[in-house]
Amino acid sequence: MKRKRLALLISGRGSNMAAILAAAGPDYPAEPVLVLSNRADAAGLEVAAARGVATAVVESRAFKGDRTGFEAAMEAELAQHGVEIITLAGFMRVLTPDFVRRWEGRLINIHPSLLPAFPGLDTHARALAAGVRLHGCTVHLVTTGVDEGPILAQAAVPVLPEDTEASLAARVLAEEHKLYPAALYWLAAGRVRVEAGRAIITGVDSARVSLLNPLPRAALLSKQ
Ligand code: GRF
């Protein structure tokens, strides 16, 4: 198996990045070759370096709104490391359509909601405010619309009555750390194709389960 050379783009703590680095042993179809941050103070850079993965910083602030110049500098780093596939892992910059098109099919993101619900920021607070009973996270191929693009995988969690934004975020994050390495595995292994805007993944079992919250009494369920 020829492993795909992987870059992970981060802006902050990098816990999803760390989950992918931990999963990416010799049998994993993506080989992390670069962690790239748009901020020098991203805590994830140290985690990556401690694991022996090359790191680079392209300070978005230095480009003062010149997104094309910022992305050209990122592309130079990506090319230098021979990158073939990119994961966005808490990368807080919107990429231009040109960049996204260049990497189409090879660029994925994780978003902390069950898309298409709650695109954008503050997803956990918005889920609580909306009173949804189920929330979660989504891994998707990146297209030119923000938090759009064919969905590879989703994980759902219950929203509990006593939840705060922090407790809900933690429950979702634990699922992100399982979901992202799995979805990236399928993409890097060449098992993802897109048909009519839907991602099809070969060789995976779809879970035939339902998640009900709140849980009706068994007696009520059996009457339906
Ligand atoms: C995660 O919640 C992810 O879904 C979102 O940004 C956050 C990044 O967290 N895109 P981390 O840096 O991976 O810990």
Image (tube, rainbow, N blue to C red):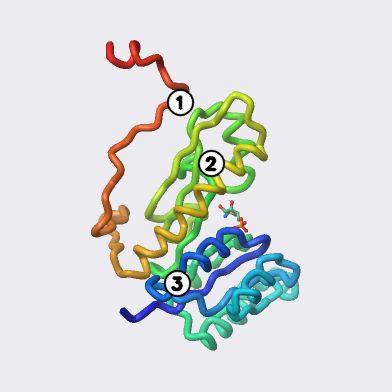
Q: Badge 1 local density, few (<14 within 10 Å), some, or many (20+)?
A: few
Instruction: Indicate left or right for 85 with 56 as reference.
Output: left
Q: CA distance from mark 1 to mark 3?
A: 36 Å
Residue beneath the point at 34% across and 81% down = 2
Disc 2 and disc 3 in contact, CB within 8 angstroms? no
In this rendering, the label closer to the viewer, 1 or 3: 3
Q: Quadrant of residue 195?
A: bottom left
Q: Badge 3 local density, few (<14 within 10 Å), some, or many (20+)?
A: few
Counting residues from the N terminus, which is met first, the one under dot 1 or under dot 3?
Answer: 3
Give the mark count: 3
Q: Badge 2 local density, few (<14 within 10 Å), some, or many (20+)?
A: some
Which amino acid type is marked by label 3? Gly
Disc 1 and disc 2 in contact, CB within 8 angstroms? no
The residue indicated by pointer 2 is 118
Instruction: Indicate left or right for 130 with 178 as reference.
Output: right
The residue indicated by pointer 1 is 213
The residue indicated by pointer 3 is 25
Residue beneath the point at 34% across and 12% down = 220
Of residues 86 and 34, the one nearer the viewer is 34
In this rendering, the label closer to the viewer, 2 or 3: 3
Image height of 189 relative to 53, above or below = above
Image x and y of residue 137, in percent? 49, 46
Q: Quadrant of the N terminus?
A: bottom left
Q: Secondary structure at mark 1?
A: loop
Q: Secondary structure at mark 2?
A: loop
Q: Quadrant of residue 46?
A: bottom right
Which amino acid type is marked by label 2? Phe
Q: Secondary structure at mark 3?
A: loop
Of residues 111 and 75, the one nearer the viewer is 111
Which amino acid type is marked by label 1? Asn
Counting residues from the N terminus, which is met first, the one under dot 1 or under dot 2?
Answer: 2
